[in-house]
Image: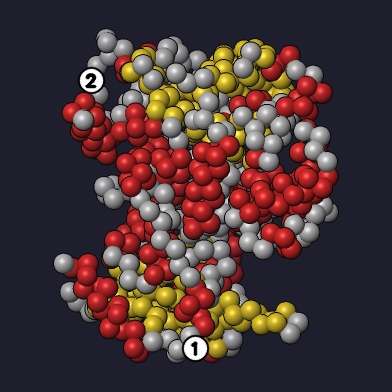
Amino acid sequence: MSERILDVKNLKIDFHTYAGEVKAIRNVSFHLDKGETLAIVGESGSGKSVTTRSIIGLLAGNAEIMGGSIKFHDQEMLNNSEKDWQSIRGNKIAMIFQDPMTSLDPTMKIGQQIAEPLMKHKHVPKKEAWARALEMMKAVGITNAEERINEYPHQFSGGMRQRIVIAIALICEPEILLADEPTTALDVTIQAEILDLMKDLQKRVKTSIIFITHDLGVVAGMADRVAVMYAGELLEYGNVDEIFYNPQHPYTWGLINSMPTLHIEKLESIPGTPPDLLDPPKGDPFAPRNKYALRADVEAKPPFFKVSPTHYASTWLLDPRAPHVEPPAEIKRRWAKYRELQAAKSNS
Amino acid sequence: MPEKKKLLQVQHLKQYFKSGHDVTKAVDDVSFDIYEGETFGLVGESGSGKTTTGRAILQLYKPTSGKILFEGKDVIKMHSRAERLAFARQAQMIFQDPFASLNPRMTVEDIIAEGLDIHHLVKNKQERRERVEQLLETVGLNKNHASRFPHEFSGGQRQRIGIARALAVQPKFIVADEPISALDVSIQAQVVNLMIDLQKKQNLTYLFIAHDLSMVRFISDRIGVMHYGKLLEVGPADDVYDKPLHDYTKSLISAVPVPDPEIERHSHRLSYDAQKEEMDGKKRTMHEIVPGRFVRCSDDEVQHYKDVAASYEK
């Protein structure tokens, strides 16, 4: 049915630092189908940005891929030379960064910045490329585009700059768009506009999106599927309803529970801080902060237990031998809602 | 309900900034009260003047005009050093960026104790040390953290140090300017819970400034909504959120993403056009629409907002 365009398997990435080897990504596997939006959620240091950057060959100089594979269609990306990467970046795979203030070239007219990928990758003549850039500016909602195409980034507001960044990313109609916290630096009303714009353009261009964020609200509105990362590992993944209404990993519970929503009386904070990745824990990395952790979670890495054909979680709580634990009230409320949704689905 | 005491009254506060011939009206005729022991949340987008309002209240700027009454005394008219020091002891600030707001060359002890030294609240080194250790424990840090430097701490821990610094002089009132926006979700909850705890224990009054509406609603008793330097709506937190009166408040709340896919699928965004209200030349001031709920509007718009408020009750 759906065409798989990206397959990441057992990815391992280390950072060489003065303090030692930081094991930033440990055995991360996920895939991306055509036209879908996968959200990767996690806190800072969870490895969500590093994972995404590895897909476009933009890892920092001290990073080394220790194993695994990243397959884009049938092409093994880890064998790419810098030249191979250059032909992919901005062409088949494009990226939007968090900070629209620093991701544009301040000395270049924005028309030039939008047209450049077309001229470089598709060898479109300058005049035509600029005409397409103008069209793209209108498509991303920049008013008065005919005049503004000759302006420089500092003449635009933050929200407008992010629109320009999106225009640059989408001008070559990439197959994959990597969006690393694209709206975190923006105000909520601007954020809502940018998210609507991305959904709109996704339908038109049929791009698949990997959306990185720590904001579960944004995920709920954007994602088809969700992957939850913590301390360099994937802990749970599933489609958006499964993660929001039927979460199984206590870390996912904690994330949902620390968001203020209508039903929450007291915010449940997750105690403690993430582990030191110089010496990652051998079991579930979240176990030290997890009040539901079993002894097995501390001692041995739990496998991915299947919750549904699309939903997997890595916690020993799902082992048939595990004792029953009572999840937080908000999670129980969500589970009940999940059963309602399931019932409604099977009835219709 | 017994009559609550007004701790802070902001009256027609204006804070203009001049750059060349241009005047930026960062805060333009803003009035509100904060009652003792409550949390007043100030929300708005960047450039709305919420931070400037907070800073003007603490006299970090010199307001262009207006009155700021703290326990009945106008802090703008406090000129003597003694008066200003006394106010500074009562009113403290927690800053947004826990990385920029702590001096990297000072130890945690010196950072926290700076206020104690200035106000002569401790007699000797040992007492100073004890007080710092006590404050560190209050905010959930370890007392042997006192001799460390800010770079040795994570963002959440640094924000705790910032809170300890503000608490050191035993203030009544704290302006918290986006205290959690630089922190991760799970850490945000820790800091917010800490602030709520401290408020209960020490009867603190907060002015909580943030753009994260859901968190502001959670922590605040009352909320004020700012836009382009003007305060548009004030009311109890849940009312403002569930039954917004002003069109801008409606658009702001409709833009807040909710961590629930079903709600997101069925939500629609409302837009707000500020031009319409700016250009019609009507004089607008704060009017009480229903008891405790204020909207900035002209005399002839009062009925409209009363109707909006009534429509929620049906």
In the displayed structure, A4 sits above or below B208; it is above
Q: Is residue A247 left or right of residue A203?
A: left
Is residue A310 among what the camera can see? yes
- For the rendered model, the colour scheme is secondary structure
Q: Position of residue B86 (x, y in %)?
A: 51, 78
Q: Would you identify the image quadrant in which residue B124 lies?
A: bottom right
Q: Amino acid at mark 1?
A: Gly
Residue lying at 24% horizontally and 77% vertically, measured from the top left: B307
Judging by the rendered image, the residue that carries numbered circle 1 is: B281
Task: State the residue at coordinates (45%, 76%).
Answer: B231
Mark 2 chain: A
Q: Is residue A113 visible?
A: no
Q: Quadrant of the N terminus of chain B?
A: bottom left
Amino acid type of the residue that numbered disc 2 sits on in the rendered structure? His
Which of B89 and A56 lies nearest the eye of the viewer?
Answer: A56
Q: Of the numbered discs in the image, which one, if any, rests on residue A192? A: none
Viewer-side residue, A197 vs B309: A197
Residue A267 located left or right of residue B142: left
In the rendering, at what x and y percent does residue A40 appear? 51, 32
Classify mark 2: helix, strand or loop. loop
- Of tags 1 and 2, the one toward the viewer is 1
Residue A149 horizontal/vertical position (percent) = 75, 57
Question: Residue at point 27% right, 10% down?
Answer: A320
Q: Residue, x 56% and y 54% (percent of image)?
A: A186
Label 2 sits on residue: A324
